[in-house]
Image (spheres, grey):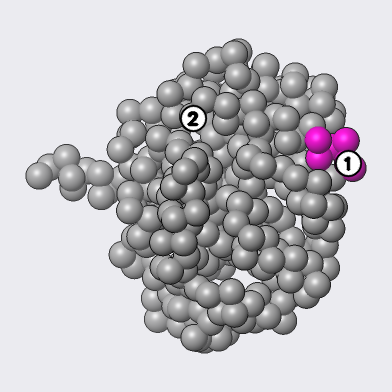
Amino acid sequence: MYIIWNLTRVCPWNCAFCCVSAVYAKGKERTQIIAEQKKKELSFAQKLGVLKMIAGKNMIIDFSGGDPLYSEDDLAIVQKAIEFLPPEKINISMTGCELTQSKIELLKKINMVEFTLDNLPDRENPFRPRGFNRASMKAMRRLVESGIKVSAVTILYNITITEENLRSIYAWLCKNGIQEWDILKYIPVGRGMDYKKIIPTDEQYLFTMKFLRSLNGSTHISFQHSLRVIEETSKCHATINSFGVLPNGEAIACAWALDRNGCTFDGFQIGKLPDESLDVILKRAREKLGFNHQTSYCRANLCAMSMQQHKERI
Ligand code: SF4
């Protein structure tokens, strides 16, 4: 089982369609914004408590955010995770901002580091801030040079799904020794709820998966399970294979099930860490909250789409 743990909502980037509605903190106000945000998150001691619970359960942690390596106390949690868990149990999804040598040394002790790369910098993308892709690419190259396993993540939407875009990313990944390329479906959650028009159709997704499977190169291509749900080769992971933990300790059935304010969709709240044990939370989710089986559809996507339809009706 794997846990997507959004350590913080703080992020040095302000992507228009951020799926967790991250809180932008950069420039003069950075310290103040981070301090304000941290008041709404678990304390360091509480996060440590959550970490110890997870470490005792043989689960994989995917640290995410926001940027989980952007503030000192979150970095300290990742450092503790390295003490408590074997390297193969820790993955990190981060951004290319402020990659220092000490972060690189830390990342040498985990399994895989993920960066989002939706397109190369020569292509216009209004959803990503200026410099975002370039920073990811620079960081990826530095980590590969340091012998760290790196994965690129590309989300498919109207701008990114073109063959030309995907071919150019793949060529760059192969040339730069990136080991994995993970392709994601666009789930209209977080601030992304407001951009329904950019979502490809199921036919487009299936066509694109076929195209990507035809590419040959050194970088391994994998498809997120929510895409494979469309081609009926996978099922929903919510609570059965994975669940999410939010910065305030809320446990949620799927890490993607967030609205435009970063709040959990109704019906996806399954508990609170570290107040409750993981066993209690998962047992209740499966026995009482309806997460006792894997659906053949993406629960978060269905919920987001129906919320959107409801909004359009009123
Ligand atoms: S709700 Fe969707 S994204 Fe979440 S686990 Fe299920 S298939 Fe995956």
Assign the N terminus to one quadrant of the image: bottom right
Amino acid beneath label 1: Ser
Residue 308: within the magenta?
no
Please give left or right for residue 26 compared with residue 45 in the image: left
Assign the C terminus to one quadrant of the image: top left
In the picture, the disc for residue 128 is 2
On screen, residue 199 above or below 261: above
Amino acid beneath label 2: Arg
**Residue at the outermost front position:** 28
On screen, residue 8 above or below 16: below
- SS class of the residue under badge 2? loop
Residue drawn at the location 57% of the way across and 31% of the way down = 132
- Where residue 233 appears, as percent x and y from the top left, is 60, 46
Assess mark 2: CB under 8 A from ligand 1? no
Q: Is residue 76 in sight in this rendering?
A: yes
- Where residue 92 appears, as percent x and y from the top left, is 68, 53
User: Magenta span: helix, strand or loop, mainly?
Assistant: helix
Question: Considering depth in this image, is 43 or 161 the residue closer to the camera?
Answer: 43
Residue drawn at the location 75% of the way across and 35% of the way down = 140
- Where residue 62 appears, as percent x and y from the top left, is 65, 58
Confirm or deny contact between disc 1 and disc 2 (CB under 8 A).
Answer: no
- Where residue 134 appears, as percent x and y from the top left, is 64, 26
Residue drawn at the location 64% of the way across and 49% of the way down = 93
Residue drawn at the location 60% of the way across and 19% of the way down = 121
Question: Considering depth in this image, is 68 or 222 the residue closer to the camera?
Answer: 68
Magenta residues, start to end: 142-147
Residue 145: within the magenta?
yes
In the picture, the disc for residue 146 is 1
**Residue at the outermost left position:** 314
Q: Residues within 10 Å of mark 1 (few under 14, many from 20)?
A: few
In the picture, the disc for residue 175 is none
- SS class of the residue under badge 1? loop
